[in-house]
């Protein structure tokens, strides 16, 4: 067992010493103007072969591989498995290859210059953070060059450290120790003196295990409370494990018996921060608890933080006098009733309001549409004993009221269609020239004479959207299944019902609804009977 430990120790020593002098990394950075070397080491044991020659090559850009030798490159030295530059320059950047028998190794060298007004290259720094008051150790070690150097010095921020003979810095770290420490090896070679540098960026940080405690929240907190109630004051802090965390609740006469300090609750977050909280419970609040500053404190070696809580009496709601409240409620109810009444009146008399608005604004929808008639009247043409009243309504009553008293222009088949022409074409043309299609519905309405004008009008209304349909139910129609399907769709719209037993007056709801469905038009009645006009149409 003892022999195995010795063997492992020997192998570790061999690997460590080898790794310090051999160039193991593929990408290498060197500083312009300083000596530099590449050294090949084989980790596997090599068989002795006296005939195997060592060759070094360089490859840079389009020049291909060039074999290196001291005669062609005066700044280069070759010995054993080492390639040295005295010194290395910017043009030495490129790929370098080592060949010895079947062994091949490649490195990629990048040569950089020193920073302006600096004694080192900022791109080639070794960062080393150190905690304050912990050991700061900077020792200059370079296994390859220290045996060639005649002197080694340690610099801080490019100024040589005085009284430092061994180029070693060992002390407790202070914040003023932070800076750039450069090891400089002075190496003579072929009558010239060269410098090899290695720079450490020393950063001194605070003790990571301790923080300056801080309380969370405003420094002064006013809490409104009610007498006789309880309150809990929560104080939270970001602190260390052993920091003092307490409430200062002592008054001049001692601590109030209703004030209780609860235990500390600590929670540590995944990132290592410690949050602590402590609750102060005040029961049955009285006048003595008001306007007193309850201070919460957290203290450590790094400092103390304090926040204060002051209890204030919560102002009660101002009582509204009873008569003011009663009057307000009555006014609110009255306004609600008036609004509801106005809405109901608007719904009931919406037609009257619309007719009044038309008359007041002088609205006219017939000025620019290019049509001749305001409405085409479709009715049963057969004038028999059983449907004489229907015929009279369509041919006499409608024109009497709409034309003479309200100034509309109707198209009546018997009156306006010229005899001897093509009836079908005439009907279609007249419907196209009309703004509305008035259909007088009855049990006997469907016949061959009205079929075409009905279909043509419904086509204009439902398909081309060029005309609106007004349905007047002269006699009650219970079953619409005998009418075209398009007319059944229109049945869902409002249908005006005519009462033949009790003909309505000109101011009746029937004529107002009919005027509402007719196009808006600024007209003058034909005749001196303006007294029969609806009341809402008078100016």
Image (spheres, rainbow, N blue to C red):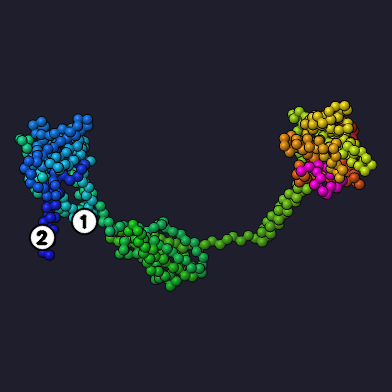
Q: Position of residue 141 (x, y in %)?
A: 12, 48
Does residue 375 show up?
yes
Is 127 drawn above or below residue 75 in the view shown?
A: below
Front residue (pair 273, 2): 2
What residue do we see at 9% from left, 49% from top? 166
- Separation (CA) of disc 2 from disc 1: 37 Å
What residue do we see at 27% from left, 56% from top? 208
Q: Is residue 344 left or right of residue 91?
A: right
Q: Position of residue 95 (x, y in %)?
A: 19, 37
Q: Which residue lies most toward the right here?
A: 385
Front residue (pair 105, 314): 105
Q: Is residue 526 left or right of residue 459?
A: right
- Residue for badge 1: 133
- Residue for badge 2: 6
Nearest to N terminus: mark 2 or mark 1: 2
- Dot 1 lies on which element? loop
Residue range in magenta is 471-485
Front residue (pair 381, 125): 381
Is 105 drawn above or below residue 317 in the view shown?
A: above
| Count of marks overlaid on the render | 2
């Amino acid at each position: 067992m003892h022999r195995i430990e010795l063997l492992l120790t020997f192998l570790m020593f061999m690997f460590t010493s080898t790794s310090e002098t051999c160039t193991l990394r593929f990408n290498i950075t060197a500083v312009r103007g300083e000596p530099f070397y590449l050294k090949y080491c084989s980790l596997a044991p090599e068989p002795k072969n006296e005939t195997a020659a060592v060759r070094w090559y360089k490859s840079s850009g389009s020049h291909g591989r060039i074999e290196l030798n001291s005669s062609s490159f005066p700044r280069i030295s070759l010995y054993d498995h080492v390639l040295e530059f005295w010194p290395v320059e910017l043009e030495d950047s490129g790929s370098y290859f080592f060949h010895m028998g079947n062994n091949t190794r490649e490195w990629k060298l990048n040569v950089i210059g020193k920073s302006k007004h600096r004694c080192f290259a900022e791109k080639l720094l070794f960062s080393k953070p150190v905690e304050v008051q912990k050991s700061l150790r900077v020792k200059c070690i370079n296994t390859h060059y220290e045996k060639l150097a005649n002197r080694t010095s340690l610099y801080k921020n490019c100024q040589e450290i005085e009284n430092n003979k061994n180029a070693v810095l060992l002390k407790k770290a202070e914040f003023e120790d932070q800076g750039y420490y450069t090891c400089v090896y002075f190496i003579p070679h072929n009558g010239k003196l060269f410098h090899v540098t290695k720079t450490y960026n020393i950063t001194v940080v605070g003790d990571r295990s301790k923080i300056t405690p801080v309380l969370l929240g405003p420094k002064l907190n006013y809490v409104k409370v009610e007498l006789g109630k309880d309150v809990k004051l929560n104080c939270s802090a970001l602190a260390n494990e052993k920091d003092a965390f307490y409430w200062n609740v002592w008054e001049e006469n001692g601590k109030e018996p209703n004030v209780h300090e609860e235990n500390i609750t600590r929670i540590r977050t995944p990132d290592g921060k410690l949050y602590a909280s402590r609750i102060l419970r005040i029961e049955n609040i009285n006048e003595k608890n008001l306007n007193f500053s309850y201070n919460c404190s957290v203290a450590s070696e790094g400092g103390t933080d304090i926040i204060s809580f002051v209890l204030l009496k919560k102002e009660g709601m101002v009582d509204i006098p009873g008569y003011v409240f009663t009057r307000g409620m009555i006014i609110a109810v009255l306004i609600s009733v008036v609004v509801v009444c106005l809405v109901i009146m608007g719904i009931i008399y919406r037609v009257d309001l619309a007719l009044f608005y038309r008359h007041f604004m002088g609205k006219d929808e017939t000025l620019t549409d290019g049509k001749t008639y305001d409405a085409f009247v479709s009715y049963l043409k057969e004038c028999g004993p059983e449907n004489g009243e229907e015929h009279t309504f369509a041919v006499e009553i409608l024109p009497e009221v709409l034309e003479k008293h309200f100034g509309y222009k109707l198209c009546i088949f018997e009156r306006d269609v010229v005899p001897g022409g093509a009836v079908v074409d005439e009907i279609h043309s007249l419907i196209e020239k009309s703004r509305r299609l008035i259909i007088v519905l009855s049990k006997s309405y469907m016949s061959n004479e009205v079929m075409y004008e009905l279909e043509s009008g419904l086509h204009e209304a439902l398909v081309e959207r060029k005309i609106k349909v007004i349905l007047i139910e002269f006699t009650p129609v219970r079953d619409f299944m005998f009418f075209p399907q398009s007319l059944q769709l229109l049945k869902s719209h409002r249908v005006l019902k005519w009462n033949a037993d009790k003909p309505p007056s000109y101011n009746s709801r029937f004529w107002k609804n009919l005027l509402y469905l007719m196009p808006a038009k600024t007209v003058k009645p034909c005749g001196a009977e303006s007294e029969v006009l609806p009341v809402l149409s008078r100016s």
